[in-house]
Image (cartoon, rainbow, N blue to C red):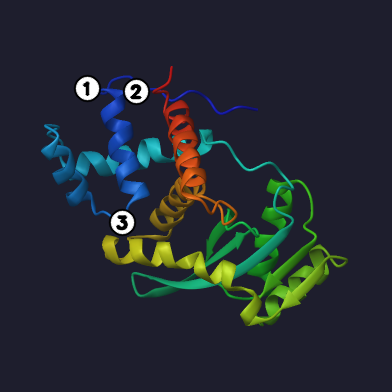
Amino acid sequence: MSAPPVSYKRHRFPRERIAHAVWLYFRFPLSLCLVEEMLLERGIVVSHETIRRWGRKFGAAYAGRLRRKPAGGGDIWHLDEVRIAIAGVPHWLWRAVDQDGYVLDEILQTRRNTKAAKRLLTRLLRKQGAAPRRIVTDKLKSYGAAKRRIMPRIRHLSHKGLNNQAENSHLPLRKRERVLQRFRSPGHCQRFVSVFSAVRNLFVPPRFVETALGRHIHQVRAIAQWNAATALAA
């Protein structure tokens, strides 16, 4: 079922400016104040608080309309978790990426145990619609315990050196976390990473795109898809 169209009713700013502000905020490591300044340079006078509200309202809508990678397109799942402190309380962001670096899913949880790993695998199976050919993790034993319960026949490689794909996927978020000066709440973190990863999935070329022409073509297609998702192409 396709996502519902994005509505800009009762917003005095044109849809082009709203979509551009949201794109700047989620695509680049910019604070709300820096986005406000960049828009001002273009003659668009809007407060950083308004940009924050746009990001919260339209970010999820845009992410829901962005084309997802076909189910089963990535048959190797790299799983990893990263610690995020929110208001002094440790949380764990569990993330799965495929062999091309495409973020398949991520979920913020307060635990780093088998139950949390099982929840990630269950969500992945439901969203992807098929089990992978193999999964790759670090040596956290919770992954092996969860895999034996959820997908016992799937091959599991557990070695820190093999899981750079998932570990590297945390780096862009770490950079954004520093710009944001940490997340205000678990809900804020989950909402942000969901949109942030959807935008990165769209605009960052996969590893197999190695030439300048290939990257250019990828960006042109990504912009066209972004315009369609934000209803700018309508």
For the N terminus, the quadrant is top right
The residue shown at (36%, 48%) is: 26
| Mark 2 closeness class: few <14, some 14–19, many ≥20 residues within 10 Å | some
Direction from residue 190 to residue 48 in the image, left or right? left
Residue 120 horizontal side relative to residue 180, left or right = right
Q: Closest to the observer: 32 or 212?
A: 212
On screen, residue 231 above or below 223:
above
- The residue that mark 3 highlights is 29
Which image quarter: residue 116?
bottom right
Q: Amino acid at mark 1?
A: Arg
Splitting the image into 4 quarters, where does residue 157 fall?
A: bottom right
- Point 62% across, 81% down: residue: 160
Residue 134 coordinates in the image, percent (x, y): 78, 65
- The Cα atoms of the two marked residues, 2 and 1, are separated by 9 Å
Give the camera-side residue of 164 and 22: 164
Counting residues from the start of the chain, the first of labels 3 and 2 encountered is: 2
Considering the image in quadrants, where does the C terminus appear?
top left
User: Which residue: 41% across, 62% down?
Assistant: 173
Which residue is disc 1 drawn over?
12
With respect to residue 119, does 214 lie above or below?
above
- The quadrant holding residue 37 is top left
Specify whether residue 120 is in view: yes
- At label 3, counting other C-alpha atoms closer than 10 Å, the crowd grade (few under 14, some 14-19, many 20 or more) is some
